[in-house]
Image (spheres, rainbow, N blue to C red):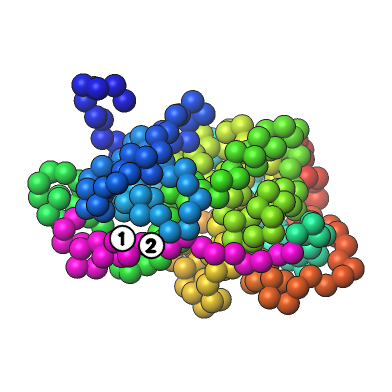
């Protein structure tokens, strides 16, 4: 940003959409707040221009950026909810219009589970031979950031009264992992350092050709067997552009095979892929009961904002199960003899979902 240029504040969704633009040149938030005490870093970290470029698991600069994104959420969430309500009232369905317009009257959302978990796990095991799988360490709040979520929340309120920030949104003591996942902002605040390598590999592949085990395997190799980083790296690449109305048309997404079980490749394939990796990531790092609770909240929110989608519900559960299985593999070790097996459930709509062309 040039000296003397007025700084333009953007909404939560506008910040993330800007961050996802191919020509966006982010500023390192670590450099932007270098040497500042946390209270000043909180005033200086700007989601409009800054992104975390450090993979450090303990990163106060990234914490400040995430807290500032969180405080932008209420206004955008209210706008998204109001738009969904209008779709419910006028059309009886909250499916986003860009997606609905492409589907047509003959399109059917499947009701069957789209993947066979046992076969998928065996296939993923066959991708894990080069490195010993480990669970890995997650990103956590720094001590200063934790302070600004507790009694320090009122310091953020004070900044609001001074006109320095929106009214702060409480995190209710939630982990950095669930806060970033819930916002769809992991790519901005929690990099692994391997996202460029994964994205570049994806862009070299043919349209509609990347299958689930291939994406997992490539990320697994780049992150040398660290399962947390493997899933997070994929999630970071897949979730960019989450709030873009035309997210299905993003070049990276066009390289993916169709994950869902629908009558044609016209459903929310973007959502299917990033939901599966996000649910698997959270389930890998948390007890199963916590994953179940979070998925119930997520399912409710998705129903309100995007309408009924049985495939998304199935994929969330598959992601949770995948995280449980990967955790088991990391703790017990790889068993010899696992072979790739077909894991797509084609019983409901028998068309080749490893290609986006019917």
Q: Is residue 133 above or below residue 288?
A: above
| Numbered circle sitting on residue 157 | none
Secondary structure at numbered mark 1: helix
In-image side of 153 versus 22 (left or right): left
Task: Specify whether residue 13 is in view.
Answer: no
Secondary structure at numbered mark 2: loop
Magenta range? 132-156
Residue sitting at 79 percent across and 63 percent down?
125
Judge the density around disc 2: few (<14), some (14-19), many (≥20) Cα neighbours within 10 Å: many
Q: Residue furthest left?
A: 162
Residue 298 drawn at (x, y percent): 46, 62
Residue 224 drawn at (x, y percent): 69, 55
Q: Residue furthest front?
A: 35
- 296 or 198, nearer to the observer: 198
Q: Are marks 2 and 1 in contact (CB under 8 Å)?
A: yes
Q: Which residue is mark 1?
A: 145
């Amino acid at each position: 940003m040039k000296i003397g240029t007025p700084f333009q504040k953007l909404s939560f969704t506008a910040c993330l959409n800007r961050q996802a633009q191919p020509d966006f040149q982010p500023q390192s938030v670590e450099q932007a707040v270098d040497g500042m005490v946390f209270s000043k870093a909180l005033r200086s970290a700007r989601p409009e221009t800054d992104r975390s470029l450090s993979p450090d698991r303990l990163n106060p600069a990234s914490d400040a950026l995430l807290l500032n994104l969180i405080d932008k959420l209420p206004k955008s969430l209210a706008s998204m909810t109001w738009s969904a309500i209008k779709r419910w009232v006028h059309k009886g369905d909250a499916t986003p219009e860009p997606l609905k317009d492409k589907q047509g009257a003959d399109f059917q959302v499947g009701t069957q589970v789209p993947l066979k978990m046992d076969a998928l796990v065996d296939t993923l095991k066959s991708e894990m031979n080069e490195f010993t799988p480990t669970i890995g360490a997650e990103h956590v709040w720094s001590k200063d950031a934790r302070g600004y979520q507790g009694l320090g929340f009122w310091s953020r309120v004070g900044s609001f009264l001074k006109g320095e920030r929106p009214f702060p949104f409480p995190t209710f003591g939630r982990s950095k992992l669930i806060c970033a996942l819930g916002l769809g902002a992991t790519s901005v605040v929690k990099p692994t350092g391997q996202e460029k390598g994964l994205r570049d590999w994806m862009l070299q592949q043919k349209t509609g050709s990347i299958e689930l085990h291939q994406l997992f395997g490539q990320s697994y190799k780049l992150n040398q067997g660290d399962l947390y980083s493997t899933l997070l790296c994929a999630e970071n690449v897949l979730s960019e552009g989450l709030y873009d109305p035309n997210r299905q048309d993003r070049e990276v997404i066009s390289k993916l095979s169709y994950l869902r079980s629908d009558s044609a490749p016209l459903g929310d394939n973007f959502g299917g892929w990033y939901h599966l990796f996000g649910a698997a990531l959270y389930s890998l790092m948390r007890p199963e009961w916590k994953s179940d609770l979070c998925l119930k909240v997520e399912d409710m929110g998705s129903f309100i904002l995007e309408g009924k989608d049985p495939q998304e519900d199935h994929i969330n559960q598959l992601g949770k199960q995948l995280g449980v299985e990967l955790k088991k593999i990391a703790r017990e070790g790889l068993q010899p003899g696992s072979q790739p097996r077909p894991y797509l459930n084609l019983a409901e709509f028998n068309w080749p979902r490893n290609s986006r062309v019917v």
